[in-house]
Amino acid sequence: MHTKFTGTVTHLWVGKAQWQNYSGRDIFTGAHKHLVDTIAVHPHGAEGDEQGNRKVHGGPEKALLLYTYDDYTQWAADGYQFQPGNFFENVTIDGIAMRDIHLADTLQIGEVTVQVSQIRRPCTTLAHRWNMKELPRLVQSTGRSGFYVRILQPGTIRTNDPVTFIKREPRSVALPEVNRVMNIDRTDAQGIRALIDAPGMPPRWVEQLQRRLSGYVTDESARLGE
């Protein structure tokens, strides 16, 4: 199947890890980001950007978080007043929707070549930041999660740079389907097997899926703040 899509960088965000008081809780986080015109990107992320909890955030497999303007439009249609940057992304993109993108897709963003590494699985920091306990679960149920990329070719990204599709791997899976199987229909054996065989699946997620086929489904209520 011929695949081609292009988009545009609308916003760029970076932030240092620091203590923030969100909903009465003190949290050490890099979620408070500021708008910049340009970011210098290396294999571990963007210059000037940090993560508070490096055990679960950051690193080469989560070098940059991208969020689509299409999802912000969908939030607005549902009555939520989220704005670009509100989901702690590094890059906000327009003209491309989550449904357009597959795991392991290679994209060109300005000078930087990236590969889609995983969807974002939301945690309680989102809930605390916006004082919405239900937000992590809502992000999962809508699939408006954003996605992480690894860096194949470092360089510079500037506001208004094009986002261009380069390559799709055989048997790859669209991001909404990854979200569905990982987070919603968690015991769908056929979907699980397809994800296990899909290129680019994080090894830790493959292990989780294999355990599901054996009847063990991880309790993720703590991650979701429930």
Image: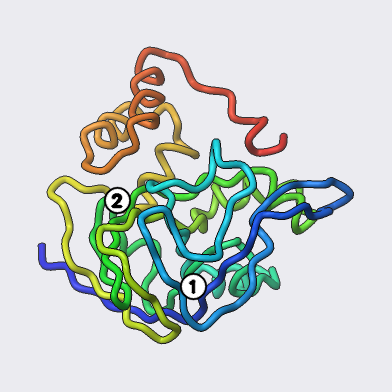
Check disc 1 and report the residue beneath it.
92
Return the mark for residue 56: none
Dot 2 or dot 1: first in sequence order is 1
Q: Position of residue 104 (x, y in %)?
A: 26, 51
* SS type, badge 2: loop
Comparing labels 2 and 1, the label whose residue is closer to the camera: 1
For the residue pair 116 and 82, the one nearer the viewer reads as 116
Q: Which residue does the image show at 34% across and 79% down from the upper left?
A: 7
Kindly indicate the quadrant of the structure image that contains residue 199: top left
Q: How many labels sit on residues?
A: 2
Quadrant occupied by the N terminus: bottom left
Q: Which residue does the image show at 36% across and 52% down from the upper left?
A: 175
Q: Amino acid at mark 2?
A: Leu
Kindly indicate the quadrant of the structure image that contains residue 197: top left
* SS type, badge 1: strand
Q: Position of residue 221 (x, y in %)?
A: 65, 30
Q: Is residue 118 left or right of residue 120?
A: left
Q: Is residue 113 above or below residue 145?
A: below
Q: Which residue does the image show at 45% across and 84% down from the upper left?
A: 159
Disc 2 crowd, CA 10 A, few/some/many (<14, 14-19, 20+):
many
Q: Is residue 135 above or below residue 84?
A: above
For the residue pair 17 and 70, the one nearer the viewer reads as 17
Check disc 2 and report the residue beneath it.
103
Q: Position of residue 61 (x, y in %)?
A: 38, 46
For the residue pair 38 and 188, the one nearer the viewer reads as 38
Quadrant occupied by the C terminus: top right
Q: Amino acid at mark 1?
A: Thr
Q: Is residue 59 above or below residue 65?
A: above
Q: CA distance from mark 2 to mark 1?
A: 18 Å
Disc 1 crowd, CA 10 A, few/some/many (<14, 14-19, 20+):
many
* Residue furthest out toward the right: 24
